[in-house]
């Protein structure tokens, strides 16, 4: 197993439950991948995913090991799911309570309440097909895609996320409220397929949660499950190459030179980087260097982790703080690859739910700003501190008064870190952009098209990014990887 992100850890548990002896190889000094944990100055900062939906996908992993997740993980519901702050200071509390949501919609646009309800019904219909029926199904052939096309057409999957929302509601702010979630999986709502509108019903159905101790507690719990199966997670083990013989993946060669033979290789590394850097060109016919270079990639992220000497009790657990532009800013990020002077932000305050993540009387935060991937040419070594200061000023002027004088712990993550530390192609934080022509069969397949016995999980393969997506990619392996006792040895 290459990589210990959530997709890789989930795949390791599932394969271990089916009799495989699994070794997970992690490049970093601790497991988690994008879900790495930084601990400094008494603060605990989750590096990446913080929005936990569809907890049953995690509960399944504990059940496979004869355990209950609740015995190891304290998962708490978060409400509101998100507090959305518009540039003019108006606020929308997005939650799972149907009556409260109708009231919030009516407060902004009474004429759109019925349209909002129609949007939610459309989201439910998409969820039942896109998530329940197809989320854990491999798309190995064009015929697999052809079978679902009628359903996708009926559900208007040819529309974009923003187009589908606009069909049902007219108020510009409500259109933002119903479409920003696609950014949480790396998609521009103005170009991402409306299939991702299923997120609205997914959240309504299962809620939004937070793991006490931070998302890293889920990583630790999954590592414990793997080790309990008699398998292992090895850190500081960078993979340099997937070895091949007669068209079959036969193992890996580590950067140290060590060769590790394997009957099956699963990559949880970024799919573009897996093919571009770990599989030699002579073994690739579909995912050639040229195709990888020409593909469309998600935005990257600038993340500032910081701790304050005081608390900000009025700030919600999850806040979406929007700038003055929406469509135009996303065009700068995704299409024009420009680092704009304005920005929108996601502010995470985990101490709203779990005060133990900061010293007494303090708050832990991270603020995330979508930025172009590295094709923008931005010199992040020069721009990191000016950009951090700009975020700090904006937060101080809006949500966190006096912030500059209250910060006592700080670190940043830039697109360069996504490229160099997390091995994300072009520093794209979510892999391939989830447009229709890069979804399902059009994404790198879970069963590699290039090599027998090579499988892919994680954000860059089907079904896509986000915790439900990467956990579902591991579920796909249940149907395409043969049982350990039936496999022909290499």
Image (cartoon, rainbow, N blue to C red):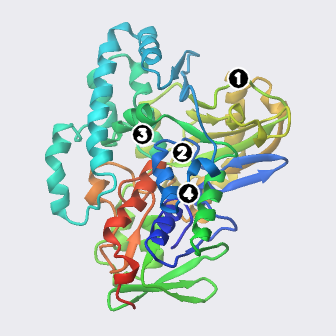
Q: Secondary structure at mark 3?
A: helix
According to the picture, the residue beneath numbered tag 4 turns out to be 67
Q: Up-down: is 394 above or below 69?
A: above
Circle 4 crowding by C-alpha within 10 Å: few under 14, some 14–19, many from 20: some
Q: Up-down: is 94 above or below 415?
A: above
- Mark 3 vs mark 2: which is more N-terminal? 3
Q: Up-down: is 190 above or below 43?
A: above
- Mark 1 vs mark 3: which is more N-terminal? 3
Q: Secondary structure at mark 1?
A: helix
Q: Secondary structure at mark 2?
A: strand
Real-space Cα separation, disc 1 to disc 3, in angstroms: 27 Å
Camera-nearest label, 1 or 4: 4
Q: Is residue 169 left or right of residue 208?
A: left
- Mark 4 vs mark 2: which is more N-terminal? 4
According to the picture, the residue beneath numbered tag 1 turns out to be 397
- Mark 2 vs mark 1: which is more N-terminal? 2
**Residue 448 at x, y = what percent?**
34, 72
- Mark 1 vs mark 4: which is more N-terminal? 4
Residue drawn at x 74%, y 24% as measured from the top left: 313
Q: Is residue 330 left or right of residue 40?
A: left
Q: Is residue 150 left or right of residue 426?
A: left
Q: Is residue 422 left or right of residue 178?
A: right
According to the picture, the residue beneath numbered tag 2 turns out to be 371
**Residue 247 at x, y = what percent?**
32, 87
Tell me if I can see residue 318 in this picture.
Answer: yes
According to the picture, the residue beneath numbered tag 3 turns out to be 182
The disc placed on residue 469 is none
Circle 3 crowding by C-alpha within 10 Å: few under 14, some 14–19, many from 20: many
Q: Residue furthest front?
A: 66
Real-space Cα separation, disc 3 to disc 2, in angstroms: 15 Å
Camera-nearest label, 1 or 3: 3
């Amino acid at each position: 197993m290459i990589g210990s992100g959530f997709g890789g850890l989930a795949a390791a548990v599932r394969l271990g439950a089916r009799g495989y002896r699994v070794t997970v190889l992690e490049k970093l000094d601790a497991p988690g991948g994008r879900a790495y944990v930084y601990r400094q100055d008494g603060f605990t900062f989750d590096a990446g995913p913080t929005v936990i939906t569809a907890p049953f996908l995690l509960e399944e992993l504990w059940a496979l090991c004869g355990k209950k997740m609740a015995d190891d993980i304290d998962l708490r519901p978060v409400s509101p799911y998100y507090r959305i702050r518009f540039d003019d200071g108006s606020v929308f509390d997005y939650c799972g309570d149907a009556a409260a949501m109708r009231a919030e919609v009516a407060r902004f646009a009474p004429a759109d309440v019925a349209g909002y309800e129609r949007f939610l019904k459309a989201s439910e219909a998409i969820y039942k097909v896109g998530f329940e029926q197809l989320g854990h199904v491999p798309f190995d052939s064009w015929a697999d895609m052809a079978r679902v096309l009628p359903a996708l057409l009926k559900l208007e999957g040819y529309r974009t996320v923003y187009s589908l929302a606009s069909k049902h509601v007219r108020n510009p702010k409500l259109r933002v409220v119903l479409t920003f979630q696609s950014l949480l999986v790396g998609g521009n709502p103005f170009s991402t397929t409306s299939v991702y509108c299923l997120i609205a019903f997914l959240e309504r159905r299962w809620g939004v949660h937070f793991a006490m101790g931070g998302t890293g507690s889920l990583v630790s719990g999954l590592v414990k499950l793997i080790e309990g199966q008699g398998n292992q997670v090895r850190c500081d083990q960078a993979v340099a190459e997937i070895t091949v013989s007669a068209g079959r993946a036969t193992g890996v060669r580590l950067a140290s030179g060590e060769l590790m033979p394997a009957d099956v290789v699963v990559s949880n590394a970024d799919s573009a980087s897996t093919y571009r850097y770990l599989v030699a060109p002579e073994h690739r016919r579909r995912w050639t260097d040229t195709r990888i270079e020409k593909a469309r990639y998600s935005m990257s992220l600038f993340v500032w982790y910081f701790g304050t000497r005081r608390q900000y009790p009025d700030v919600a657990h999850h806040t979406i703080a929007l700038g003055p532009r929406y469509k135009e800013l996303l065009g700068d990020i995704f299409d024009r690859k420009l680092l704009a002077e304005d920005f929108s932000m996601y502010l995470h305050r985990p101490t709203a739910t779990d005060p133990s993540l900061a010293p007494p009387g303090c708050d832990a935060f991270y603020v995330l700003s979508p930025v172009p991937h590295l094709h923008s040419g931005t010199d992040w070594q020069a721009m990191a501190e000016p950009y951090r200061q700009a975020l700090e000023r904006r937060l101080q002027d809006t949500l966190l008064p006096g912030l500059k004088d209250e910060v006592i712990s700080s670190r940043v993550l830039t697109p360069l870190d996504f490229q160099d530390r997390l091995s994300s192609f072009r520093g794209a934080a979510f892999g391939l952009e989830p447009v229709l022509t890069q979804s399902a069969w059009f994404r790198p397949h879970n069963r590699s098209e290039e090599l027998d016995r090579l499988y892919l999980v994680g954000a860059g393969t089907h079904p896509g990014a986000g915790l439900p997506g990467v956990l579902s990619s591991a579920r796909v392996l249940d149907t395409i990887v043969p049982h350990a006792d039936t496999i022909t040895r290499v």
